Amino acid sequence: MLNHKGTKKIETERLILRKFTIDDADDMYNNWANDDLVTKYLTWPTHSSVEISKKVLGYITESYKEEDIYSWAIFDKKVSEVIGTIGVVDKDDNHEYCTMGYCIGQQYWGKGITTEALKVVIEFLFKEVGYERIQAFFHSINIASGKVMEKAGMKYEGKLRHYQKDNKGNFVDCDFYGIVKKDYFII
């Protein structure tokens, strides 16, 4: 049985994971959403204006009314900006699993930030919400995303061919990773 708590503030040494606000639109736009390299392997297109980022944030902030929504802004304490996002992008409460998604600005790649965020979100979703399984997948070419999943304790489970369309409408293969509760508590 799941115990939904909504998007709660989580803090690490370097980061604060918190709910988005409309005031985060400039950070979203400038730090990742307007960058074609960041969105290259994602399902949504690069934002062409800060107004699009504001619309997206309006949808996200409205969704926080529901206790089963988990969508965090990744706030970097050092630069005092929102540098990315992490959250549950799909879930099945009946079977007690969820699918994670994340994205950060390229100037923050390779610093362990996304891994740090994913680890604490996995901990929250297992310990406080009670999910049995947490999974994630990525466009098979984007191997850096798989390394984040591995470093966060997830295991490679296979490739699904033509699983999803990218932001240009092309079908792409996706690599799946997952972690289950019993493995998490053994690690």
Image (tube, helix red, strand yellow):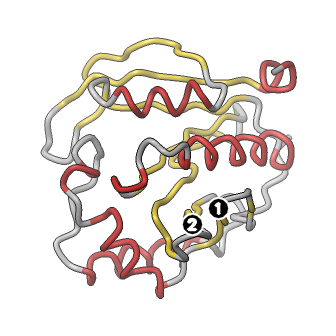
In the rendered structure, are the residues bearing label 1 and label 2 in contact, judged by CB atoms less than 8 Å apart?
yes
**Of 123 and 128, the residue lying toward us:** 123
How many numbered callouts? 2
* Tag 1 residue: 15
> In the rendered view, does 183 fall on the left or right side of 143?
right
Q: Which residue is drawn at 79% across and 39% down?
A: 126
Above or below, comparing residue 67 to residue 54 in the picture: above
Residue 103 in picture, x, y percent from top left: 42, 52
Quadrant in the picture for residue 7: bottom right
> In the rendered view, does 94 fall on the left or right side of 63?
right
Q: Residue at x 37, y 58 (%)?
A: 105
Above or below, comparing residue 47 to residue 96 in the picture: below
Q: On residue 76, which mark appears?
A: 2
Which residue type does callout 1 highlight? Leu
Above or below, comparing residue 81 to residue 177 in the picture: below
Which residue type does callout 2 highlight? Asp
Residue 142 in picture, x, y percent from top left: 31, 31
**Of 119 and 69, the residue lying toward us:** 119
* Mark positioned earlier in the residue sequence (1 or 2): 1
